[in-house]
Each structure stands twice: as structure tokens, then as C-alpha cells.
Image (tube, grey):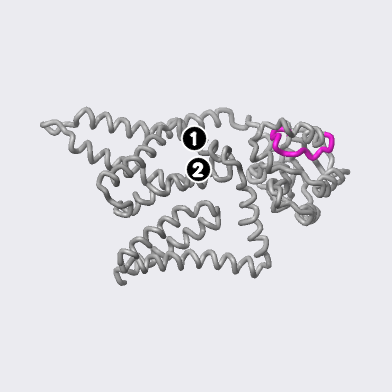
Amino acid sequence: MLDGEPRTLFGYFAGAAIGLTFLLRPNLIGTGLLIGLILLIQTRRRDAFADVRLMTLVIGFLAVVLVTIVYFALQGTLDSLWEVALTYNVLYSRSPWGDRLRVLRYGLDLLADTGVQIVIVGAWVFALAGVAAARRRLNSLHPLVFVGLIDLPFEWLMASLSGRLYRHYFLALLPAAAILTAFFASRVLSAVRSRQTADGSPAPVRVGLAALMIGVALLPGIRLVERLQAATAAPGSSAMQRLVEFVKTETAPDDYVLVWGAWPTVNYLADRRAPSRFIYQAPLYMPGYQSAALYDAFVAELTQRPPALILDSSGTDRGIPPIDPAKRQAWLDSFDQLPIPESERDAIYIPPEMDIVFDYLTRRYEIIGQFGGWDIYRPAS
């Protein structure tokens, strides 16, 4: 095997991984773009092998994306792919800049308990200062450090574009954070190696820095263990566990269960299928995305796969319109007082055309009780 073949193969796999990441969440494309940028810079510096790596990266990316497009085209659902992947996401991400700035702060707060944000930001500043002090260009850094330096603020921005406080959006920061943390640790270790006493024993500064690094590394693990212990202290007592057991008891394994709201967790834990592609119904409330055809399709799915149970979570989530007409009217009357961000309030709109959904549900199903504040519906007798 030629020396260049393993690296060429790696380029294909890297491009395919970037394509899969992009298809999973388009806003995760940052790292892939930066890798391509580095290869492009190397190409402009007449690095012959960089031409091959960039080409294989692009081919790997396009192969995954084009295969996906062809698959959906053959299934006759290419329009649906475009509608969900692009149209809905663009509408979903329309938020005031005030909300986006609030999410930026939220991302910092997520790391506040661990102290890791100090290391990450410190490493980022350290790397940038090193470049400035040496009067070198960014591309003179090690490629991984270059990616971490540029990708960290980029991913932070991308995670905040929707203006919504969802902590899993910030998982995209972890690769850049890991790179910068490793870079920071290597610089610290390099510095302390040169600071030893005459007899070779560790200097106090070395011990102090080592303790700092160990503390930063252990704190997240200690807090995670504490939270796991608290969560498992009384197994079977949590509301979610009791609800899942109720669903398992009241339905058969092949029954469909509709969770009205944003809790597909129940379907997963109870191992019960959702009757519709709308496992949560946020798209039904999204201005600009709604249509009578969308509601007709939703009702058609429920008709084809009638739920054995409907769990209305609006009793614990005031951002969800209740199924019950009287409760829904009260919800609409108090909508201006809902304790939710402006961007999310603007993203919930109940047009008259949606009555077809509520009429279907109230005509076919009846409330049999409540469970943890959720209304439980069964097919009407």
C-alpha cells in the first residue's frame, strides 16, 4: 500500500462524517467547514498532498449528501425533506437578537459549576495571544489548535441562533473545548517542567498547577455522581417512571400512544410507537409553516394509526395548548401572561384551520382521568 493511501482513505471517511453530521443538524457544519478551510489554505501554499486531501474530503461529503437526496427522491419524499430540513429550520430560528444573547449567556452558565469554561476561554486567549506575540498568521498554528481557536466562538454563535434555551445545542462546543483544554494542559506542563528546584524536586508552582488541573478534571465527575445518586435514591418513585409504568400497563406493545406536547421520552421509555411523524407538535404551531394540508395529513395519520392513549402534557407545560376546549379557551385568554420567551411565544400560533385537529381529538377521544397533571384520553366508547 502506498504511503498516501491511508491518508486518502481518511479524507473520504472524514468527508462522509462531516456529511452525516450536516444531515443530522445543519448547524453542526462549523468544524467541517474549518477543516476544509485549513486544507484550502495549505493548497494555496502549494502543498500538493493538501489538494488530494481536500478533494477526497469533498467527495466523501458529497457522496453521503447525494445518496441521501437520491434515496428521498426515489421514495417520492424529496419535497418533505426540503420542507423539514430547510423551511422549518429557517422559520424555527427566527428570533430577536436579545433572545440569542440570552442563550449565549446560558451557554456560559452551563459550564459554571465545573470551572472548565475558565480553562477553555483561557486556552483560547492564550493561543490567540501566542499568535499575536509571535506575529504569526493563524494558519501557522497546529491545525487542531487552529480549528479549536476559530471553531469555539463559531459553534457558540451557531448554538445561539435559534434563541431557545436547550442545553443539548451546546454539545457542538465539546470538540473545540477538548482541543483547547488539551492545548492549555500541554502548555502548563511545558511551563512547569522548566520550573524545578535545583535538586530536581517539584516546585510549589508545579504542585499548585497540577492540583488545579486535577480539580478541574474531577469536579464534573463528582457532581455527576452526586446527581446520579440523587436521581436513583428512590427508584420507581419519580413521576416519569410511574407514568411510563402506567402506559405499559394500559396499552399493548403494538399500540400507538400520542403524547400531546414535547415529551417523546414517554414513547421511548414505554416502548410504544407514536402514531404520527409529529412526535411533538411544535411544527403545528409554527407561523409560516402551518397549512390546512398539514393538519389534514396529521389527522390522516391519527386515523390510520389510532392511538390507544393520548397523554396531554399541557397541564405541566403552559406552552402547549390543551386538547380540552374549555381549558384551551382559558389558555388562549391567558396567553399574554405565559412565562415563556418572546421568541417562543411568537412561535406558537393556533390558526382556525387547526380546529380540524382539535375537533377530531375531542370527537374520537374522552378524558378518563389525570396522571401527574396530564389529562389522559382513551377512545370514546
| Residue 262 counted in the magenta span | no
At a point 55% along the width and 28% down the height, the residue shown is 233
Compared across the picture, whether 371 is left or right of 189 comes to right
| Residue 318 counted in the magenta span | yes
Instruction: Say whether marks 1 and 2 touch (CB < 8 Å).
Output: yes
Q: Position of residue 243 (x, y in %)?
A: 69, 36
At a point 69% along the width and 49% down the height, the residue shown is 283
Q: Position of residue 41 (x, y in %)?
A: 35, 60
Amino acid marked by disc 1: Leu
Circle 1 SS class: helix
Q: Position of residue 188 (x, y in %)?
A: 27, 38
Q: Which mark is residue 170?
A: 2
The magenta segment is: 315-326
Compared across the picture, whether 295 is left or right of 86 comes to right
Rendered view: 246 above or below 155:
above
Q: Which residue is mark 1?
A: 110
